[in-house]
Amino acid sequence: MTRVLDSKFGWTVGGLTGPTISRASGNFVWSAAVAEFGMILRDSKYKGSATFTSVAELARSARGPDREGYRAEFIALVEMAESLAKQKMVARARAN
């Protein structure tokens, strides 16, 4: 599955062309996960096929040393947002 992170520069996740996220530093990958989360929350037209699950997977892959626990807290926040989004979808389905 290829997800475009930046259509102008061609950064992709899992793509075979152009620079890939697998070659990026851990901090860059972490920043990409945080940016992707923001795009989902804002329902940005640039979010592409980003999902809460993909954000959590990307963040987990780049967690690295986390002495203060901020990265673990971010991952928990993403998981909580996903859970709330699912609850909202279920509530909407029941209302209809």
Image (cartoon, rainbow, N blue to C red):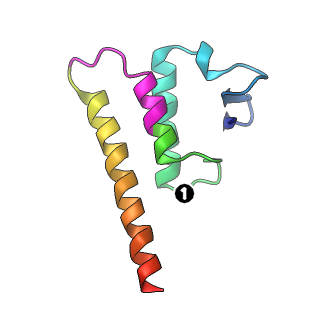
Q: Is 57 inside the magenta-drawn segment?
A: yes
- Identify the residue at the far right of this view: 17
Q: Position of residue 22 (x, y in %)?
A: 60, 17
Q: Which percent across, then down, holds residue 83?
A: 35, 55
Q: Secondary structure at mark 1?
A: loop
**Is 77 a magenta residue?**
no
In the figure, is residue 81 to the left or right of 7?
Answer: left
Q: Nearer the viewer, residue 70 or 1?
A: 1
Q: Taking the image as drawn, is residue 4 in sight? A: yes
Q: Is residue 89 above or below residue 57?
A: below
**Could you tell me if residue 34 is visible in this image?**
no
The residue most toward the left is 68
Residue drawn at (51%, 21%), measured in percent from left and top? 28
Q: Which residue is mark 1?
A: 43
Count residues near mark 1 (Cα–Cα under 10 Å), then give few for <14, some for 14-19, many for 20+: few
Left or right of 59 in this view: 25: right
Is residue 19 shown above or below 15? Answer: above
Q: What residue appears at the point 36 percent right and 16 percent down from the top-left corner? A: 64
Q: Which residues are magenta?
A: 56-67
**Residue that sits furthest to the bottom in the current view:** 96
